[in-house]
Amino acid sequence: MTLRDIVKSLDATVYLGENQLDREVEKAFASDLMSDVLTLKETPILVTGLCNIQTIRTCDMATLDEVIFVRNKKPSDDMLELAEENDMVVLGCQYSMFKTCGLLYQLGLKPLY
């Protein structure tokens, strides 16, 4: 599925990467623990409620290119600047992490574990 499909299904806000919404996504991972994100061996879309510069830095270190912030979290300008430097797509939605993951699963995204 594409990021465009995800944006539509989650009624998500595209904070960064509007021109990259045709990227294909196969798997998702949800966590607020960035130490868990750093252990990933694959590159899923990250679903998180932890909205700070460390999240973007962690995504960069883990080579994750897409992140969805849940619970109406809005990234700061510094976060978006760093994400843009790393060619990331940054989305946000109003739903809880649980509901967001459920909707992504219904769309056909696979979990890592």
Image (tube, grey):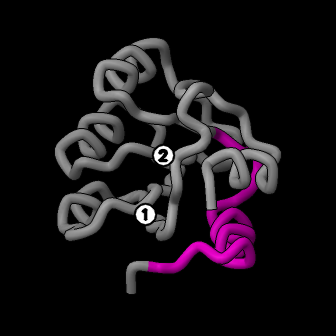
- Image position of 64 with respect to 92: above or below: below
Percent from the top left, x then y, of residue 4?
A: 69, 45
The residue pinned by badge 1 equals: 31
Where's residue 28, x and y in %? 49, 67
Nearest the eye: 9 or 31: 9
Expressed as whole percent of the image width and height from the top left, the position of residue 19 reads 58, 26
Neighbor class of circle 1 (other Cα within 10 Å; few <14, some 14-19, many 20+) is: some
Residue at 74% across / 42% down in the picture?
12
Image spot of residue 60 (x, y percent): 24, 39
* Magenta-drawn segment: 92-111
From the image, tell me which residue sits under label 2.
67
Residue 77 located left or right of residue 100: left
Give me the residue at 35% from left, 41% from top. 55
Q: Nearer the viewer, mark 1 or mark 2?
A: 2
Which of the marked residues, 1 or 2, is nearer the chain's N terminus?
Answer: 1
Q: Nearer the viewer, residue 86 or 94?
A: 86
Frontmost residue, 6 versus 71: 6
Q: Which amino acid type corresponds to the residue marked 1 in the rendered image?
A: Ser
- Residue 88 is covered by the magenta coloring: no
- Is disc 2 surrounded by few (<14), some (14 to 19) or many (20+) residues within 10 Å? many
Task: List the single residue furthest toward the bottom.
Answer: 113
Residue at (17, 44) in percent of width and height: 61
- Identify the secondary structure beneath mark 1: loop
Q: Secondary structure at mark 2?
A: strand
Q: Quadrant of the C terminus?
A: bottom left
Q: Is 97 within the magenta?
A: yes
The answer to which image quadrant residue 32 occupies is bottom left
Q: Residue at x 45, y 20 (%)?
A: 80
The amino acid on which the numbered mark 2 sits, given as a three-letter code, is Val
Where residue 9 is drawn, which disc sits there? none
